[in-house]
Structures are given as structure tokens and as C-alpha cells.
Image (cartoon, rainbow, N blue to C red):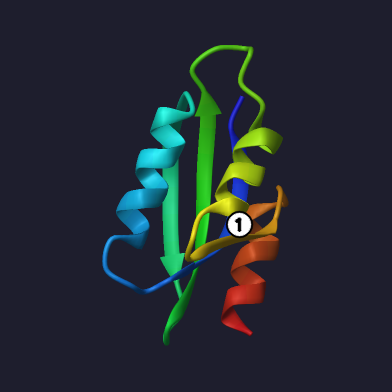
Amino acid sequence: MTDTLHIQIDHADGSLQRLIGLVERRGFHIDGMTLAGEGPMRRLQLQVRGRDSGRCVEILGRQIDRMIGATRVAAACPVQAFQTEVAA
């Protein structure tokens, strides 16, 4: 099952690379990614799937919250709602 995380990430060097590394080290596959926005902070929609049934996306979200330069904005919501929010 694929879960969607909505993340606000800074535009600093290496932020996206650190985030991708964190997701992979925690046992998740990245099925899709959309980056939007301008300025120092960007909005990222990340679709992830656990490598096995023992992986919890909520724990991954809390680990992302602790990462410097990244914060979850919402745990999971429909793609359409995210696209409307970014366009506004």
C-alpha cells in the first residue's frame, strides 16, 4: 500500500538528498515525488511504500519532523487536495 506524505522542505543544499536517504534507510520505497513552490521553502508530496508489512508510515513521518530543514504539513490526504493547496 502506498501512503502519501506532504512535507515542507528548505531549498538548502542537500536537503532533498538527506530526505531521500532517510526514507530509504527506514525501509521505504519511494513510488512518486512532486516538488512545488518557490522561495526558501518548497512543498513536497512523497508517495512511499514500506518494504514489508512491519513498516509504519507514521513513524517515518515523525523521523522526518526531526530532520533539520523538513517538516510534515499533513500525514496523508488525497492528491487533488494537495494540488489545490499548492496552487493557491
Residue shown at 41% from the left, 49% from the top: 19
Residue shown at 61% from the left, 21% from the top: 55
Is 74 above or below relative to 87? above
Q: Going by the image, does 8 lie left or right of 84?
A: left
Q: Residue furthest top?
A: 53
Where the N terminus falls, by quadrant? top right
Is 72 above or below relative to 29? below
Front residue (pair 57, 1): 57
Residue shown at 42% from the left, 83% from the top: 40
Query: Residue 60 location in percent, x, y?
Result: 60, 37
Residue shown at 43% from the left, 40% from the top: 22
Is 79 above or below relative to 13? above
Instruction: Identify the amino acid type marked 1.
Output: His
Q: Where on the picture, by quarter, is residue 56?
A: top right
Residue designated by label 1: 6
Query: Residue 42 location in percent, x, y?
Result: 47, 73
Where the C terminus falls, by quadrant? bottom right
Mark 1, residues whose alpha carbon is within 10 Å: few (<14), some, or many (≥20)? many
Is 77 above or below relative to 22? below
Query: Residue 59 location in percent, x, y?
Result: 67, 34
Front residue (pair 79, 50): 50
Q: Where on the picture, by quarter, is residue 65?
A: bottom right
- Label 1 residue SS: strand
> How many numbered circles are shown?
1
